[in-house]
């Protein structure tokens, strides 16, 4: 019986030692698990912070893209308006250009007509001047001839008077 009790005490001691070893292993395992849990919580916190930053950046980028789209639409509208204005101005320019060309052509024709009529007038006046000069020359010759004839007649009259007066 003593051997059985000894065996029993030995088995109980062994069981207590195993329990202590198992308890130690469980404590180590529990510590390891607690460390892993803490690491997982830190990683989770880091991921949540990174996600929060990413989300904030996404929202900021989204609002920037919306602003760019709005600006693009405004600029497209302005470009369209300016193209329309440019087209109208080009049409107005072409219209004014044609009008100016027509007026210039009309003015040029009027100037050419004036120039021709002036040349005609000058030629006519030059001919009238020559005619007048010829008439003046003819009249001067006639006056000289008449003056000479009058002088001869006066001489003849004086001679006759002298003859009549001496007789």
Image (cartoon, rainbow, N blue to C red):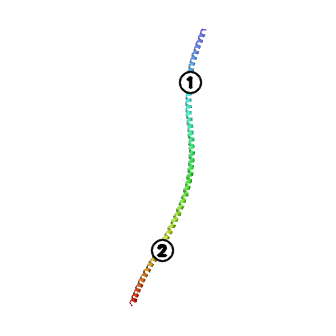
Question: Which element type, helix, strand or loop, lies under badge 1?
Answer: helix
How packed is label 1: few (under 14 Cα within 10 Å), some, or many (20 or more)? few
Q: Which residue is mark 1?
A: 34
Between disc 2 and disc 1, whose residue precedes?
1
According to the image, label 2 marks what residue? 128
Q: Tag 2: Cα neighbours inside 10 Å, few (<14), some, or many (≥20)?
A: few
Which picture quadrant has residue 163?
bottom left
Q: Position of residue 96 (x, y in %)?
A: 54, 58
Residue at (55, 56) in percent of width and height: 92
Nearer to the camera, 104 or 130: 130
Quadrant where the image shows the C terminus: bottom left
Q: Quadrant of residue 165?
A: bottom left
Cα–Cα span, label 2 and label 1: 135 Å
Residue 148 versus residue 50 in the image, above or below: below
**Residue 85 located left or right of residue 155:** right
- Residue 136 in the image: x percent, y percent? 45, 77
Check disc 2 and report its element: helix, strand or loop.
helix
| Foreground pick, 165 / 128 | 165
Comparing labels 2 and 1, the label whose residue is closer to the camera: 2
In the rendering, at what x and y percent does residue 43 appear?
A: 55, 29
């Amino acid at each position: 019986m003593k051997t059985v009790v000894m065996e029993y005490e030995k088995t109980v001691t062994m069981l207590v030692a195993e329990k202590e070893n198992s308890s130690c292993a469980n404590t180590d395992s529990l510590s390891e698990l607690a460390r892993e849990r803490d690491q997982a919580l830190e990683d989770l916190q880091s991921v949540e912070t990174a996600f929060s930053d990413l989300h904030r950046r996404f929202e900021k980028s989204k609002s920037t893209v919306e602003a760019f789209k709005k600006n693009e639409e405004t600029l497209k509208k302005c470009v369209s308006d300016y193209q329309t204005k440019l087209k109208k101005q080009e049409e107005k320019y072409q219209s004014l250009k044609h009008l100016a060309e027509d007026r210039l052509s009309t003015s040029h024709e009027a100037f050419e007509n004036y120039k021709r009529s002036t040349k005609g007038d000058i030629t006519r006046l030059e001919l009238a001047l020559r005619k007048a000069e010829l008439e003046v020359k003819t009249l001067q010759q006639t006056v000289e001839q008449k003056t000479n004839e009058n002088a001869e007649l006066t001489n003849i009259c004086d001679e006759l008077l002298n003859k009549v007066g001496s007789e």
